[in-house]
Image (cartoon, coloured by chain):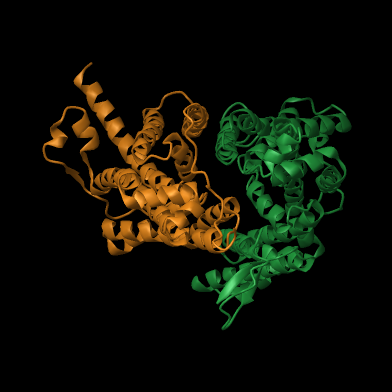
Chain colours: A orange, B green
Amino acid sequence: MSGAHHIVLIVLFSAAVQSGTTLLYPTIGEIFAERSGILNLGVEGMMIMGAFFGFVVTYITRNPYIGFLAGVLAGGAAALIHAFVSITLRGNQVVSGLALTIFGLGFTNFYGQRWINLRSPVTVSQMSVPLLSKIPYIGPIFFKQDALVYTSYIVAIVMWFILYKTKVGVHLRATGQNARAADAMGVNVYATRYWWTFFGGLLAGAGGAYLTIAYAPFWLDGMTAGRGWIAIALVIFAMWDPLNAMVGAYLFGGIDALQLQLQAVGVTIPSSLLNMLPYLLTLIVIIIATLIVRVKHISAPKELGIPYNREEK
Amino acid sequence: MIRFEKRESTSTSLKILIPTVSIILGILIGAVAILLKGINPIKVYQALLIGAYSSKYTFSETLVAATPLILISAGLIVVFKMNFWNIGAYGQYIMGAIFSSYFAIFWSPHIPKVIMLTVMVIAGMVGGALWAIIPALLKAYWEVNEVISTLLLNYIALFVLKFLMYGTWRDPLSHGFPLSKPFPNNAQLPRIIPHTRVNLGLIFGIIAVFVVWYLLKKTKFGYEIRVIGENPNAARYAGMNVAKNIIIAMIISGALAGLAGMVQVSGIIHLLQIKINPDYGYTAIIVAWLAYLDPIVASFFAVFLGGLASGAYQIQITMQVPFGIVGVIESAILFVLIGSEIFMRYRLVFDVGKKKHSGQEETL
């Protein structure tokens, strides 16, 4: 293979990691919300809130990191609506999550008109990690990225550790498996669910903000374009494990980057079919993942989507 | 201390009170959102009401928007009753439009109108049903999560439509715009109110509402899906075929969404294009929930939300108020509605200074 091919592939895979980062944050967030027993189908809505506030605050402050933080908090704030409705009021989590998506898309359309097609004046700068970036292939793909990508690696690893190796993780998993037993262990079920639903929102906001700050630094109405739903599908693909989420996110980031690349070089496949690819493959992968999950007897958290009522026996 | 105490039975007055309060609160939250944008909400709502209900013509446009909502929500109620989350009416609607448009675009304009329209109605229903069978089979046999599969199929349907409209279905005379050739007269649903766009589709909607009502109340199928919705394990022990019922329910739901898509292209737009308002598929979910899954009540909420949508189209043009306000209002209504359901099952009890409560209503 010639050097030019290498460069093309490295550019493609590097773009795959960036596209994957917009999915990795929300997928990890939803994994933890679901682990606590809360199904939040509002990821798309929380992502678009994060994308919008991330963009606007970056535009105004000219500081992408402050913008990112704003996007993260916007996602978290949106999640609190779902938390209140589904934890305190024990409302239907499917419908509440859909309402959150409708809310996010409506809100950002309503307030976003004057930002449409504006480009962000600044973006996050790339920085090479010493030593690691020198590794052949891996280095230029994973370690010549920006700080927000590196943060996502750290989040995935730290959250994996918390989930499986700490008391917090034990309590979290117990809450999603059997809330009453967790309660008996002394876990505050309501507080646990509130916190992890909020955390899920923070990370969904992070994914959205990364989209408008780094991956596609402009604002378009509805620009998350279903990424939130792909993230929810990736939770099953990842079997509720944050490290598996990395595999899924970069796989889909790769498909996304590939279809954009193919369109850029002008292949004869119609763009509508290329655009369809990520959704079609997500569907196929989710079918395969569901079958594997069944064969391996892995299941979703047992009390996913079931409200907890402390006073009822 | 304030706590929730279990109710013995749900009162019907709450079934009226809660949706009413939800709508009022939704409108108030919408008003705050408008105010924050520096616009006078009273003027916006005034214009919205005028745009939706003030004259015979504007009200007819509300009915035009309500028609697909009536059709789709009637179908959604069937699947929602069994706790099957069909979020895919959007895609099923698109498929209905595509399947029926095929005949309008490629068949002869000289075929008798009755035959052409019958074929298109069937094609629309088949298109929607086929798109709905995919997630039904995946759920029934492999337990694939239907929320995710129906949603992904929405995006896929949209790209199928785009593929056709930028490809072989585009009218050579459309100057490159993604429009099909206009439907000939024999492929246009007749209008039922002169000088308006209200067409036969509204009658289809009314028929669908009564068919669904009958199915749910008077047939074994209706009984079985209710039992499955309430307790799938009990249903299995009782010997009910859950998989079969999922598939039948989804065929009904998809067919009605597909018919709504057919009505939109054949009755309103008179050609196929990318913008055929499939978002009705999401709004219909709200309609079904506001009505607590009662198809007859749902048709009234369809007129209400149809009015909101058609009024919002008007104010988007006349007052530059973005259409997203509808999403803000609708989501606020839904949050309040879902959040208030707790009052159907529990009552609020204020026990001041009481240390112990009887607890007899607490047990399940």
Q: Nearer the viewer, residue B254 or B197?
A: B254
Q: How many marks?
A: 0
Residue B98, given in percent of the width and then of the height, sits at 68, 33
- Residue drawn 51% across the image and 52% down it: A42
Q: Which residue occupies the extreme left position in the image?
A: A131
Where the N terminus of chain A falls, by quadrant? top left
Image spot of residue B331 (x, y percent): 59, 59
B123 versus A66 height, above or below:
above
Residue B116 appears at what percent x and percent y?
83, 30
User: Closer to the camera, A17 or B280?
Assistant: A17
The answer to whether residue B299 shows anywhere in this view is yes
Q: Quadrant of residue A11?
A: top left
Nearest to the observer: residue B141 or residue B282: B141
Above or below A213: residue A268: above
> Residue A222's x, y, as percent?
49, 50
* Lateral position of residue A49 relative to residue A154, left or right: right
Query: Residue B34, located in which quarter of the rendered image?
Result: bottom right
